[in-house]
Structures are given as C-alpha cells and as structure tokens.
Amino acid sequence: MAVLEELQQAIISGNRNRAKELTQQALEEGLEARKIVVEGIAAAMEVVGEKFRANEFYVPELLIAQRAMKESLQLMSGASIDHIGTVVIGTVKGDLHDIGKNLVAAMLEGAGFKVVDLQVDVAPEKFVKAAQEHSADLVAMSALLTTTMGSMRDTVRALQEAGLGGKVRVLIGGAPITQSYADEIKADGYAPDAAAAVERAKALLTA
Amino acid sequence: MAAHTVLFHPGEKAISVPTGSSVLQAAARAGLSLHSPCGGQGRCGKCLVQVKSGCDEAKPVERQLLTEEELAQGWRLACQTRVVGTAEVTVPASSLVAEHHIMVEGVGREILVQPNVRKVALRLPPPSRDDPRADLSRVMDALGPGVQTPTSLDVLQRIPGLLRGADYRVTALIVGDALVALEPGDTAEHAYGLAVDIGTTTLVAYLCHLPTGRVAAVASELNPQVQYGEDVISRLQMAVSQREGASHLGRLVAGAVNELIGRAAAQAGVSREAIYELVIVGNTCMSHFFLGVSPTGLAGVPFLPAFRSPQTVRAADLGIEAHREARVLMMPNIGGFVGADTVGVILASELDRAKGLQVAVDIGTNGEIVVARDGELYACSTAAGPAFEGAGISCGMRAAAGAIDRVAIDDDVSYHVLGDVPPRGLCGSGLVDAVAEMVKVGAIAESGRLLKPEEVESLPEKVRRRLAWNRDGIEFILVWPNQSGTGRALSLTARDIRETQLAKGAIYAGMALMLGELGARPGEIERLLLAGAFGNYIRRESAMAIGLLPALDVERIECIGNAAGVGARLALCSVSERRRAAEIARRVSRVQLSEREGFYDRFANAMMLRPLPAEE
C-alpha cells in the first residue's frame, strides 16, 4: 500500500503534518484502522527502533518520530483497534523523570499496545489498582534515581500480595537499573532503552 | 561673634565659620567628609590635616599622637584644632571619606562600594597617668560606638603585645559591625575579598580590592567534582549513597578554591592572608556540597534543600586558606535546584527592578532561566547538560587558550581560536556557531542527522569532504589533523549534535513553558539576557539560527557575561546589594518543569535545529 509506506516515512522522519495527512487519506481510502496501525505506525516505530540500535537515530529523532506518531494515532482514537496487550506504565514514587518513560509508552502504543500512563511519582498501590482496573498484561516501571529504585521492589511485592503475581508481568528500566537488579527483585524483564522495551514487552506477552 | 574664613586645599573650598569652631566642623560645613570614627574625641588619629595658618596651638592629646617633626610641619587633628583667624588647611586624601564606585562590566551598572569588611588605620594615644585606659578600651573608643567588642579569645590574647610592639599605630579589621582582628601599622589598603562562582562544570574566582571594589585578578578552574558525574544528579546520588559523600565533594571544591586563591593572589602580587571574606554563588547542590551538607531532600519529590537562607561560616572551618579570621558568605538559594547563582544573575542584571517582559538565560550545565515581568519573578532549572560549557562534546573544552570560539562555513570552514594558538578543542560559543553554520550550508538536516556525503552533492567540495565515516557513523571534521594543536582531527560526531539538540531543546522548552505560564509568547520578550560560564560569549545570531533562543530582533538580546560571578562581586563589595540578594531569593517563584503539563511536548518540538517558534 503506497499510502502506508509513505505514512511510515513521514513518521520515521518526524514529519507530523504529513503523517496526519496520510493517515486521513488512508482512512478515506477505506483502510481498516488495525491495518493502518500495524503496517503504518507500528512498522514505522520498528524501523525507528532499529535505527536507534544502529546509532543512526538518537533521543531527538525518537522524540520527533513519536510526535508524528501521536498525530496519526489521534485520528484513529474513535476506531476500534485490536490491541495486542494492555500495559500500565509509570515512573515510581518519589521520582519525576518521565522523558524515558514517555518514549517507552509511545513506542509501546505504536507497536499496538493499549497504554495506561499513570505519569510520575506512582506509589505501588496505584500500580496495583490500575493493573486490576484495566486487566493489564504488563506493568512497566521507570526510575532515574538510585534513591527511588526501591519502590520497584515494593510494587512487585504489592502485585503478588494482590494475587496478580501470575497474571501480570513486570518490566523495568531507567538509567540505574540493570538486569541483575531485575533478577534480584523478581521482575520479569529489564530493558535498557525504548526500542528494547518494545521487544521485551512483546516477548513477555507470549511467555 | 567673630567669624573667620577657612580655605581648604585641594579643591579650593572656602567657608566662613564662627571663631573657635573646630577644623572638623569647618570641613563638614564646606562639604568635606573627614574620617572620625571616635566621634571627634581625639582618640583615633584619623582626621589628620596640615594647617598653614589661622589655628590655635596643638593640644596635649595631639602631642601624644603626633611626632615633633609632624607638628613642626603643621600636622594636626582636625577635631582638636580650633579656628582663630583666617585659616588655610590642606586635607590629605587618606583623611577623606572617599566614595568609590565601580562600573560593573557586562551589565553597565555603577554601584557604591560599601564592603562588609573594613579596615581602619588608627593612631591611638599612648597610655599615661592621665590616660590609664585598658588596652581594649583604648582601641574600642577609637573605633566609636558602632563597632562591637571582639568575642574571639585570640584577639584579646594578641592585643597587649600588638599595641606596644606597633607603637600604638594599628589597623583594625572590622567585619560587619564586629572587631575581628588587629594588625600592626597602617595596612588599611591591604584588604581583599574573593567572589567565587562555583559552577557545576566551571569555577571562577574574582579577587577584589575591598576599599575600591576593583578586580585585582581573575582565575578559573574545572570543577574537580566532575569525576563523580557531569551533572548534579549523579553527584547527588553519590552524596546520598556514600558515607561522608557530601563532605568529600565539599573538600574537593575547597581544594580547587584554594588553588584559585593561590593563582589570583600571585597574579595580584598579594598574600592569601590579605583575603578577609569570600562570597560564594552556585546552584543549590553546589552550595550544599561546599558546606559539607548532604542535599538528601533534593533526591526526590518534593525536592527540598536543607537550607535556603544566606549562610556565614568561618573559612578555616571549610579548609579554605585565607586570613585566619576570614569569613565565607554562601549566598541564598531560591528553591529546588535553582540556587544562589541564579540570585547572582538577577542581582547583576536587575531583573527584580525591570519593567516589561524580560528573560535571563544562564547557558550552562543547569540552564537556569529567569522570567521577569514588572517585578514578578519566576525561575527554573532545565538541566541542559554541559555541552555549552565544553564538556560532554567529544572535542569540547572550556573557553581557554586553544579553544575555537567562532566558526564560519562558506566554501570551506574557517574559525577563530582563543589565544591565537593551534586549536585544541571547541568551547560553547564555537559549538553553537559550528552547528548553526552546518545547518546553514546543509550538512545537517533540521532533525539533527548528519547527512551522508552522497546526499549532499551540492556542497562546496572542501566542505563536503569533511563529512567522513567513523566507527559509529558520520562525523564532520572541523579541523584537519595537520592543523590541529593535538595532532588529531577535531570533529563533531552525530552524538555531539544530539547532545547539543538535547541541551538547547531543554533550554528553549523551559523558556517557552515559563512564558506560557504568564500567558506570554517568546516574540513578546523585550529584553533577553544571555549569561554564561566565564569567557563564554555565544553569538546571538547562531543561537537563534539553531533554535536555542527564540527568534527576536537581535538588539533585544544582550550578552551579560558571567552574571552569577558579577552578582557575587556585587554582594562582596556592597552590603546593600547583599541585602537585596536575600530579598530577591525570597521573592522568586520556582517552577518545577517536570511537574508541568506540556514540557515533554515542547521539548520534542524544541529538538529541531531551526529558528523557533516554528510557523506550523
């Protein structure tokens, strides 16, 4: 589909006006919302992720691509899309850093997840409540300060105590976070950047 | 009653006074302010004048203070000398209360010099049967009622030996309103203070001659704390997680300050013991570390400091090597991460008194921004990163000899190097120029991507061949190896461009957000002040071309240099400026950017390397 390929290009290059136009065009041509998301948006974000890993794209490109992607997604908010899963995401209690978390949220949305963003300074109880309310498949947590990391451990425990241990997978990330920390607190996955986060999230769904 | 004319030299001021008036009274009437701390009691020897004619005989107290030779030459104490006929008197400069003004460069202000530290040279009447006052009383009487008795045992222990050894001619060191030390002889002119800007990346110290406010020397140094991280958050984490972390960071900076003291003192030809006060500015984390206080509250929401008000401590307690009684004034913080350096910027630029919409941007590691409108003040910290101070960039360096500070690209790259030596790196202003020029000729896309050589066939050949492949991708070679002072090429890598985008994006977005809070648009800014690390003079046109600053008429943008350092100097040289600083710190409203809706979006928008705001 030419229009979907062009939409991909528009998102990858961060041209949000073009992304909006092409999404509009695709809808008018009668394409299914699901097809637009998968072959237009999600495909674009995958390429963005690859270029990021190849050091061709960096945080600025991710930000502007994500902006274009949002324009596109907004036009389809009315349509029903089959999401591949539901993610509850937030920055942990005591921490306000959200740029990394926002990137991950955007990439997950672009990949076809339903994303419930709890924003920042999120206490363990709040993660649990949202996971229950939205029947989440995944809880994703971000922290930038070593002083706030401990809250991730508390959230894992809170989820277990609420009986969600088997049903909800936990994915963590942030500058001071490591795989060994994830193992230590019994989180299901760790990702070093937004692109890896999407891969891990998809893998955890089928695990 | 009879009246006589007194003619004062120099200045040829003539005044008529009733017979029997003191020369001190006559001088006051003529508009001449003579020193008289003891209140005209003949106890301090400060109101010396040379009488040619028309006055009475020397009094006993004068005979005690002046030598036979001096009396023979006509030297008298103005407060004891009475006018009895037509008189002619010369007043030496040392007896006049001189008002010094300093012109503050960069901000174009003139202030009256009134330092917190004063030295007063005294000629004390020696003891006799008629004057058996205790040593300490003798000194305190000469200084007058405004000065408090010293509380230091050290001063008391030194007084007897000092007075007798110096023949009752001593100099009093007064800090605030307290006598802090006595020195033999007349050392009044020998008084220095140090204004220090402790930046996250760069420290700058200004050695000032306190009586005149003149800058005697300047020295700068890289902040040694960088080994624990380029940004305050990394150092904060170290301080919080390691025992004695904050003290260790403080000792590192104290060491650097001592180094700066040594260099500045040598430059000025004075000893470090002549430094009596230090005034420090720095962001909130820097102020905490310097005092060895752990900024634990800053590690998470709601980001509260341990202290905000100005703090005065003894220099010796911090390991600072200056005069043994030297004091350190840590200027007040505003709140959160926005600290004393921002207060310094406001003090220097007078944004607290500004009319209309004015903005000050400190283009440094923390990228503080102040927005002022008719006295309402807002400030935020954008955590821009050290790109504009020369760190974090692969060939970045401070603005020192060897740094490229200007770049132009036409059919080839040309640049200017500080110190006229072969280039060793790029400083902040050079970086901004380089990126702006690369965008101009089309070597970088607006998104920040360095274009591949095959994508830019239209570039002049000499420019095109500078786009080269390295291990990680493309880089732009600014200086060829054979022209470089390091023997290796100086290049801008893709990562360097991204660091620049992140830094400038943070600053622009922070500014746009704060303006938005006031319901104002960037185009409405009447005056935009650019402050930065010492020696950093970013070109306004380049800054606007890459979207670091909003697109405005260039005359609305002013470079005010190291305004934080200037603020520290102002507080050092003037007690009223010091009080104003404390007031400013209380008045400013701090904006926590990450709590605001829309920062993220604005940040994404601000990544683009093009004039902003963009027409959509």
Image: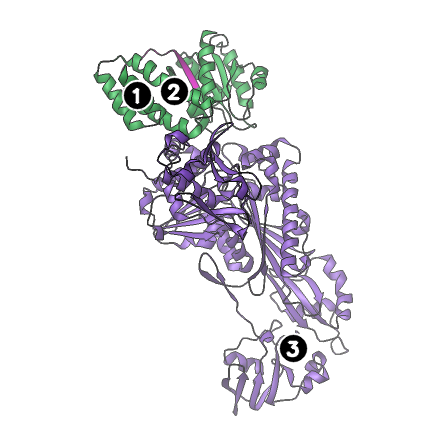
Q: Position of residue A54 (x, y in %)?
A: 47, 22
The answer to whether mark 1 and mark 3 are in CB contact below 8 A is: no
Query: What's the magenta bit mostly, secondary-structure-wise?
Result: loop
- Say whether disc 1 or disc 2 marks the residue closer to the N-terminus: 1
Magenta residue check for B546: no
Residue stretch rendered in magenta on the structure: A75-88
Position above or below: B595 against B121: above
C-alpha distance separating marks 1 and 2: 11 Å
Residue B594 shows in this picture: yes
Query: Which residue lies under the disc numbered 2?
Result: A45
Quadrant assignment, res B136: bottom right
Which amino acid does the dot numbered 3 rest on?
Gly
B594 relative to B330, above or below: above
Looking at the picture, tell me which residue is in the foreground, B406 or B151.
B406
Task: Find disc 1 in the rendering and name its residue.
Answer: A7
**Circle count:** 3
Horizontal side, residue B273 vs residue A42: left or right? right
Query: Which amino acid does the dot numbered 2 rest on?
Result: Met
Badge 3 density bin: few <14, some 14–19, many ≥20, Cα 10 Å? many
Disc on res. B42: 3
Q: Secondary structure at mark 1?
A: helix
Q: Chain of mark 3?
A: B
* Chain of the residue displaying label 2: A
CA distance for labels 3 and 2: 88 Å
Taking the image as shown, residue B334 lies to the left or right of residue B142, namely left
| Residue type at the position of mark 1 | Leu
Which chain has been coloured green in this picture? A
